[in-house]
Amino acid sequence: MAKGLEGVVATETSISSIINDQLTYVGYTIDDLAENSSFEEVVYLLWNLKLPTKTELEAFKADLTAEMELPEAVIKHLRSYDLSTVHPMAALRSAVSILGLYDEEADVMDQAANKRKAVRLQAKIATIVTAFARIRKGQEPIQPKKDLSFAANFLFMLNGEEPKDTEEEAINKALILHADHELNASTFTARVCVATLSDIYSGITAAIGALKGPLHGGANERVMAMLTEIGDVENAIPYIKEKMENDEKIMGMGHRVYKNGDPRAKYLKEMSKELTKITGQAKWYDMSVKIEEFIKEEKGLPANVDFYSASVYHSLGIDHDLFTPIFATSRISGWLAHILEQYDNNRLIRPRAEYVGPKNQEYVAIENR
Ligand SMILES: CC(C)(COP(=O)(O)OP(=O)(O)OC[C@H]1O[C@@H](n2cnc3c(N)ncnc32)[C@H](O)[C@@H]1OP(=O)(O)O)[C@@H](O)C(=O)NCCC(=O)NCCS
């Protein structure tokens, strides 16, 4: 038995692949995509398995912006949370589930309806995350602007002002790098859910739940908590040594598939270097480099996508508990692609378990136990 299904190939896919530590989306390297494309172009690619023409891309962008508005009932729901205790990932998971209640097509299962719902979900997730972030600060949610990109609109709806070019570029690139990742835990969750022929909203709600965990998307927030606790560059190695002596995991390090290095991490590392310099907070980058080098040497483990994304988002002034919701805002594109692929060639996903519990037990009546 492969614990954690390590190395098990559970499905075929045409969406993304990891071969020899190289990640590709529909056969395009993430290097080409990160350096040249927009997030919207990548989403189109993942859902249609081809790059859009200029006209197709313009139409797709317009569709996304047009779908960003939330039903008033969902906003009302976000306002009703106990904002002092609710984590944005829990709020997002619940809000997406509620969103399904207000989509008349939620249970319409033909391909065209599912594609329409994919656009709605991709668009509205950005509004849910940013509206929640504003509401908890006593600010009003903001409507998107038609002429802004998805990345720029995300920052605009979050901060109430249009981002600088460097900020838009950083978020655009981060969204591209997080968009899809073969059969990661949350994507597998989404596929298992919809393989029962349950609806898209259920699949995405389940996937958000899986992403929330600290071993998956929840790691980026914890990386920043660790850096904050370390405080200064000279404390980094003693802090990490102590963690290792206590057998504690270092967040943002290690990966199930990449053993030599995560191909996404180098871009986030570059961005972290640039942005922490701009904001005069180079210590977060310097500290991260020290930790990365130390863990590589001591345990042979590479930094993963979450490690440098923490200092990138922090440099953009984003609240730390919004890091994982940003991951979700990107990864939903991959979840939706995989859900559409699953529906197109479905079979119930139902593996077996090896039973290791007691056998041949004799039932004892309750009054005699
Ligand atoms: C990503 C992760 C869950 C992969 O887990 P996995 O494939 O099951 O790997 P394992 O937990 O079996 O780890 C294998 C070995 O490396 C060690 N290891 C793995 N990640 C580690 C980490 N982040 N810090 C310290 N040691 C780690 C394990 O302790 C284990 O050591 P051992 O063989 O001496 O017992 C794991 O590396 C991890 O927990 N990382 C931190 C969380 C994180 O950053 N998640 C985001 C992933 S993109």
Image: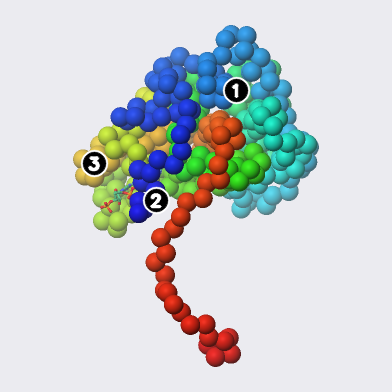
Q: Quadrant of residue 261?
A: top left
The amino acid on which the numbered mark 2 sits, given as a three-letter code, is Gly
Q: How many residues crowd mark 2 within 10 Å: few (<14), some (14–19), many (20+)?
A: few
Query: If you read the primary sequence from the N terminus, does the residue marked by circle 2 or circle 3 appear first?
Result: 2
**Could you say which is closer to the camera, residue 287 or residue 65?**
65
Residue lying at 73% horizontally and 48% vertically, measured from the top left: 80
Callout 3 secondary element: loop
Label 2: which residue?
4
Q: How is the image coloured?
A: rainbow
Q: Which residue is mark 3?
A: 300
In the image, taking residue 255 as reference, residue 208 lies left or right, namely: right
Would you call the spot at circle 3 few (<14 residues within 10 Å), some (14-19), or many (20 or more)? some
Residue 179 percent coordinates (x, y): 50, 29
Q: Earlier in the sequence, mark 1 or mark 2?
A: 2
Q: Would residue 56 be seen by someone viewing this image from the given angle? A: yes
The residue positioned farthest toward the top in the image shown? 54
Of discs 1 and 2, which sits in the foreground?
A: 2
What amino acid type should be assigned to the residue bearing mark 1?
Phe
Q: Which residue is found at the position 63% from the left and 18% from the top?
A: 61
User: Which of the two discs, 3 and 1, labels the residue nearer the N terminus?
Assistant: 1
Label 3 amino acid? Answer: Gly
Q: Is residue 362 above or below residue 268?
A: below
